[in-house]
Amino acid sequence: MAASRRRASMTDPILVLGGGPAGGAVALGLAKLGFTVAVVATPRPFRAMEGVSERVVEGLRNVGFRYALEALPAPTPRMASWNGTAATANTERLVDREQLDAGILQDLQAASIRVITGRVSKVEEHNHGFDVYLKGQSEPLTTSFLVEARGRSAPSASLPRKRGPETVSLLQYWQGAPIAPCSAAASFTEGWAWMAAGADGTRYLQLTFDVASKTLPEKSLLVAHCNQILLSLPQAQHFTQDAEPTGELHARTSTPILCEQAVGERWIRVGDAAMAVDPLSGNGIFQSLSSALQAPAVINTLINKPENAALAQQFYQQRVDHLFHRFARIGRDFYALEAQWPTQPFWQQRACWPDTAPLHQIADPSSIEVVMMPVVKGGFIELAEVVTTNDQPLGIWHLNGQPLAPIAKALAQRKSHESSEACFTRVLGMPAKAAAQWALWASQNGWVTE
């Protein structure tokens, strides 16, 4: 950004484009830090149901959502049929996204955050900040700091992006008599299916394909093609029996996308606008919250401690990159479990992308280092001593209030044949009980080999 451009301040309203989990979490976090915030919320263009895990529920609770949590139903069974084996995987909560988004907006309004309903048509950047135009309105909304949280639909803004295998998900509704809510995932030759039944009898049947697949017909024939696949899947029978397709079909990109520049001096991208993962991982809302939880401290630093702007940008981009590759590897390993069609392009590409690096590494005590890295401290991004290892490259700052750098430094001074417990007592003056607890933790996490 040019030096002549005016920086944002605490009194300038921060504008968040997007009222989903990521945008809502950032808005609530900024309000808690004392910022004035406004959120532009765009109604969903079509109905959607999404399966969420219990850690998503915990993430929403940690953000401070209340009404959004009331939109979550009880957990329901989820079946999985993969590599020729069928099993009850676990449970998930089948969330109506319209209800969840409405709850999020209620939470924002309860926090005195202005909610503006509309669809963004254009964003222009000027020396004073940004002008945001909404469809049907001639006067723009102005802001000196912009949060892009419109998910996958956010414009690329000509920013460098990394893309995974090009993927499309085709969602179709079927309607039948009410049945007990449940969901299922099943693999087939050309891709995989996610199926869910709502209590009102609506069935959400989604098929995911490779975009370059030669088996996909022209647009006018897609509905018939999807129906043919669904009716051939034994796992889909429970969802299609005594039900009829409505004829509505919605195509959504499911391509994993990483924005390689997710933050600037006066703007930041959060949630799927920063990194969007393959829906197979089942972590969409969770990963959105992961980046959104860190964004308020980054924004606070950019505005109120501009001398640390580069540090804040480094902190945020490293974590976005790390999350993206972590979730990508989760998807890769799950795709690799499906071995029935190893030569099919869909499975062949996804079983080896993004790389061959293991999802988890066995901790190596020799890799432990104490280094200075950016951390969230007091609502800002600041440098602190953290401990990095081969399996924790971004470092760990503290655990339950205990900084870990002194623990690592003490272990580096451990004498031959000295126990970790004795080392902590000798070097750090820890009481016996605390020394024993940290010795156990160090052993369980691979920091020592007794």
Image (cartoon, rainbow, N blue to C red):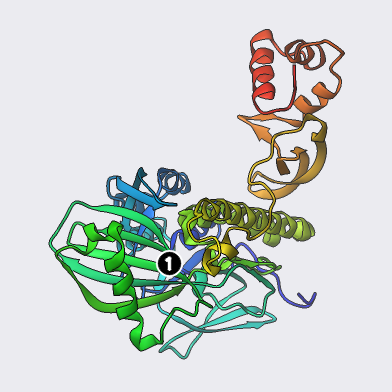
- For label 1, the SS is strand
**Coordinates of residue 29 in the picture (x, y in percent):** 53, 53
Asked whether residue 107 appears in the rendered view, the answer is yes
**Coordinates of residue 256 in the picture (x, y in percent):** 57, 66
Judging by the rendered image, the residue that carries numbered circle 1 is 114
Query: Residue 108's quadrant in the figure?
Result: bottom left
Q: Residue at x 78, y 46 (%)?
A: 373
Q: On screen, 222 above or below 168?
A: below
Q: Residue at x 28, y 78 (%)?
A: 248
Give the amino acid type for the residue marked by disc 1 in the picture: Arg
Query: Residue 145's quadrant in the figure?
Result: bottom right
Q: Quadrant of the N terminus?
A: bottom right
Q: On screen, 41 above or below 428?
A: below
Q: Please state if 414 lies on the left or on the right of 52 as rendered.
A: right
**Coordinates of residue 363 in the picture (x, y in percent):** 71, 33
Q: Quadrant of the C terminus?
A: top right
Along the viewing direction, whichever of 87 and 440 lies nearer the viewer: 87
Query: Residue 420's quadrant in the figure?
Result: top right
**Coordinates of residue 168 in the picture (x, y in percent):** 47, 73
Q: Residue at x 46, y 56 (%)?
A: 285
Q: Residue at x 52, y 56 (%)?
A: 335
Q: Please state if 444 lies on the left or on the right of 70 as rendered.
A: right
Asked whether residue 13 appears in the rendered view, the answer is no
Along the viewing direction, whichever of 430 and 325 lies nearer the viewer: 325
How many neighbours does mark 1 have within 10 angstroms: few (below 14), some (14-19), or many (20 or more)? some
